[in-house]
Amino acid sequence: DDAVSGGWSAVKLFVGAFLFAAGGLYIVFAYSILLPFASGDDLPLFRSFDHSICADNPRFVFFENSSQGLAAWASCLLAQRVYQTIDLSFARLLTTIFLAAGAAGLTVALHRLKLSRSVAFALAVAVFPLPGFLAQCLTSLDTPLSLGFVFALAAHGFARKVSVADLRARPLGLKPIFWGILSLAALGVSASFYPVGTMFFLVPTAAMLLFRNLDEWPDTRLELLRDGVLFLATVIAVLLLLPRLHFFAFPLADAGKLGVKALNLWNIYPTKFIATF
């Protein structure tokens, strides 16, 4: 599981993809990092003289009321560094780094499906410069939301540690339970940053349906079941533990956002399935 095809380890591929993605995304987002400006959602930051008071941060209040606790506190920490528009560049640089980490994680996941390194990287990087992510980069206090994608992909990486052989031999053994708990924990963290970002857990899962051969269906079916159970367990846990977090109440609107982001993949793989997933 630690190795990917072509003799590259997962760690080497992740680091290489991260460096290239960070460089590419920096070029795309450079103007928002280098130029001093604030978006409309950032302006309330400058209404308060004491940024150490989280309750005076409207973004903190919004996230807190939405039960996005980690996003709320991260937003408050960022606000403490902001006193003039140029200070917002630091938050945008962090967003670029987080999105590059997400692109690198997705590259590794796609390469494990026997896509070449270049194609896997191209598909992954094509997602993150899209307008929806650009809006996150321009709105500095949305920086914590980017971590939702990173932790969702990390959760899928943990889930992959439970191999098909493990699922067939001892699905309730120590190894599946250990990695399953880690995966659920990462999904919970993802939801606390950005509930919609948690759905990125299913991107590598859906990719299995697109790129796996039919003769691999018995193994693919078990992996789909594994991922489905983990994701459904997360949804149930979030709904029970965080009743204010409308996990699937607003995704009807947010599904449109994800759809718009995904349509750009048509430029690389012009199929209906790619645009859908």
Image (spheres, rainbow, N blue to C red):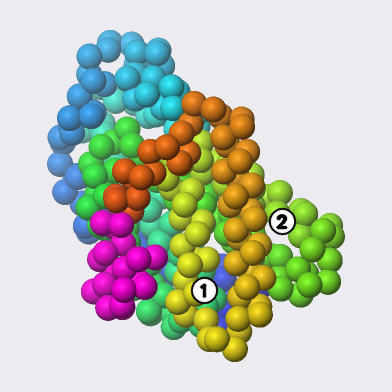
**Magenta residues, start to end:** 259-277
Quadrant in the picture for the C terminus: bottom left
From the top left corner, tell me how far across and down residue 71 is, in percent. Answer: 45, 32
**What secondary structure is the magenta-colored segment mainly?**
helix
Report the amino acid beneath label 2.
Answer: Trp
- Residue 79 seen: no
Identity of the residue drawn at 84% across and 60% down: 173
The local secondary structure at tag 2 comes to helix
**Residue underneath mark 1:** 208
Determine contact: label 2, label 1, CB under 8 Å.
no
Up/down of 71 relative to 258, above or below: above
In depth, the one of 28 and 210 nearer the eye is 210
Q: Which residue is mark 2?
A: 179
Kind of element beneath mark 1: helix
Give the x, y percent position of residue 197: 43, 48
Res 274 seen here: yes
Give, as a three-letter code, the residue at label 1: Met
- Which quadrant of the view contains residue 254? top left
Task: Tell me the number on the disc at residue 48.
Answer: none
Residue lying at 55% horizontally and 86% vertically, measured from the top left = 214
